[in-house]
Amino acid sequence: MKQPKLIDYTLLTILSLIWASAFFNIKIATYSFGPVTIAFLRVFFGAIPVLILCYYKKIKIEAFSKDWHWFAMIGFINLVAPFFLIAYGVKSVQSNLAAILMSTTPLSSTILGHFYTKNEKFNLIKTFGILTGFSGIIFLFSDNLLIDQNNFTSALLILLGSTCYVIGGVLTLKISKKKNENVTGSILIWATIILLPLVSFTEQPWQVSPRTDSLISVIYLGIVPTGIAWLLRFKILKENGLIFQSQVSYLIPIFGTILGYIFLEELITIKVLISLTAVCIGIYFVRRADRKKLS
C-alpha cells in the first residue's frame, strides 16, 4: 500500500464525518418516521449510487445467483436489523450517545474474531483495549442524567445494533472473494426486498405527512452515509488498506458527539466525555495489536 498523503487523510476525515452525521440525522428522521420506514428508505436510497456505479463499471450484481442466501442473510443482519435497532433506540436516546455506543464495533469484532477465526486471538494488548473500551460503555450507562429507566432498553438496542454489524462482517467472509461493490449492491437489494413488505404492513409511510427536515434527513441517510460512504470506503480500502481505513473508528464517536451538540444542542456531560475517551483508548490498543501482527 502507498504512503498516505494529505488527500488520503482528507478522504478519511470526510468518511468519518459522513458516518458520524448519520446519528443526528436519524434523530431528526424519527420526528416523522418509524424505525422500519427509516431502515427501508436508507437501504432504498442507499442502493441507488451503488447500483449506478456497478452499471457504469460493468460489475455484475449477483443478488439472485446461487449465493443468494448469503446475500439475503447478510442483508438482514448487516443492514435491516442494525438500521431498525439504531432508529428505534435513537428515538429515546441522544444521538451522541448512539455514536459512542456504536463505536464499540471494533471491540465486539475482536471478541467474535477470537472465537470464530484462526488468526484473531486475544493477546495482552487486545485484552487491555477491550476491557478499557467496554468499561467506558458501562460508565456511560451510569449517567443517570442521560440514560434512565425510560431509555435504558433503547440504549441496549443500539449496542445490539453494533453487534449485528460485527456478525454481518463475519458472515461476509464467506463471500470475501467477490467484488465489494457487487456484495454491497446485492445485500442492499435483499435488504430492500425484506423491508418492503414489513414497512407496508407495519408503518405504511405513504400515509405520513412528514416534516421537511425529517424527509431531507432520511433521503440524506440513504444516499450519503449508506450509499456514497460505502463507495468512499472502498476507495480508501483499495488505495491505503484496512488498517488505515479502520482509523475512522476513533473519529466517528468524536464527530458524532460534536455534531449532536451543534445541530441538536445535545447535552455533553463529564461522564460522556470520560466514556468517549475510554472507548477511543480501547479502540487504539485493539488497533495497535492488529498493526503489530501485520508488521
Image (cartoon, rainbow, N blue to C red):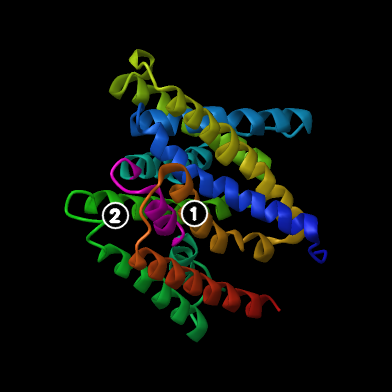
Side of 151 where 82 appears, left or right: right
In the rendered image, residue 118, in percent from the top left (x then y), is placed at 54, 72
Q: Nearer the viewer, residue 206 or 118?
A: 206
Which sits earlier in the primary sequence, circle 1 or circle 2?
A: 2
How many numbered marks have been drawn onto this rendered protein structure? 2
Q: Whole-Å distance between the Cαs marked 1 and 2?
A: 22 Å
Q: What is the span of residues highlighted in magenta in the rendered image?
A: 90-104
Q: Which residue is mark 1?
A: 258
Residue 203, placed above or below residue 59: above
Residue furthest to the bottom: 124
Quarter occupied by residue 39: top left
Report the front residue among 164 and 262. Answer: 262
Relative horizontal placement of residue 18, taking residue 152 as reference (left or right): right
Q: Residue at x 75, y 54 (%)?
A: 238
Q: Is residue 99 magenta?
A: yes
Tell me if 103 is positioned left or right of 269 in this view.
right
| Residue in the picture at 36% in, 27% down | 33
| Image coords of residue 21 (percent x, y) | 52, 45
Q: Quadrant of the C terminus?
A: bottom right
Residue 195 visible from this viewpoint: yes
According to the picture, the residue beneath numbered tag 2 turns out to be 156
212 up-or-down from 287: above or below: above
Q: Amino acid at mark 2?
A: Leu
Q: Could you say whether the residue bearing mark 1 is in a helix, strand or loop? A: helix
Q: Badge 2: how crowded within 10 Å, few (<14), some, or many (20+)?
A: some
